[in-house]
Amino acid sequence: MQLGSIEAIKRMVRAGLGYSIVPRMAVERVEDRDGLRVHSLAPRLYRQLAVVMRQDKIVTKGIA
């Protein structure tokens, strides 16, 4: 199942509907972890991001 909101994912885990892998920053604060058990993964996971835009748009220095 895919959900677009990390908060929705955490609510579903709290409700006992499964497990999830979320960004560490989503559970850094104590109040973000309420009702959740957090485990770090080893080795650490990384993701690469890309900027995607329309082909006919000009790339500015701020984006490049």
Image (tube, rainbow, N blue to C red):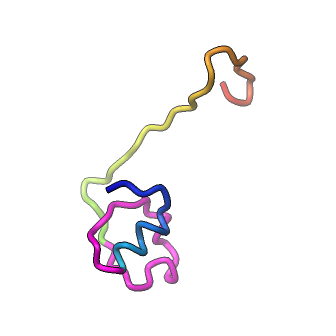
48 falls in the magenta region: no
Q: Nearer the viewer, residue 57 or 38?
A: 57
Name the image quarter holding residue 10. Answer: bottom left
Name the image quarter holding residue 18. Answer: bottom left
Q: Nearer the viewer, residue 11 or 52?
A: 11
Q: Nearer the viewer, residue 46 or 59?
A: 59
Report whether 16 appears left or right of 24.
left
Q: Residue at x 68, y 29 (%)?
A: 63
16 above or below 51?
Answer: below
Identify the image quadrant of the N terminus.
bottom left
Expressed as whole percent of the image width and height from the top left, the position of residue 51 reads 57, 31
Expressed as whole percent of the image width and height from the top left, the position of residue 43 reads 25, 53
Identify the image quadrant of the C terminus.
top right
Expressed as whole percent of the image width and height from the top left, the position of residue 54 reads 62, 22
Report whether 17 appears left or right of 60.
left
Q: Residue at x 36, y 79 (%)?
A: 14
Q: Residue at x 43, y 63 (%)?
A: 24
27 falls in the magenta region: yes
Q: Nearer the viewer, residue 43 or 3?
A: 3
* Magenta region, residue range: 15-38
User: Which secondary structure dominates the residues rendered in magenta?
Assistant: loop
Expressed as whole percent of the image width and height from the top left, the position of residue 16 reads 29, 78
Q: Residue at x 28, y 68 (%)?
A: 19
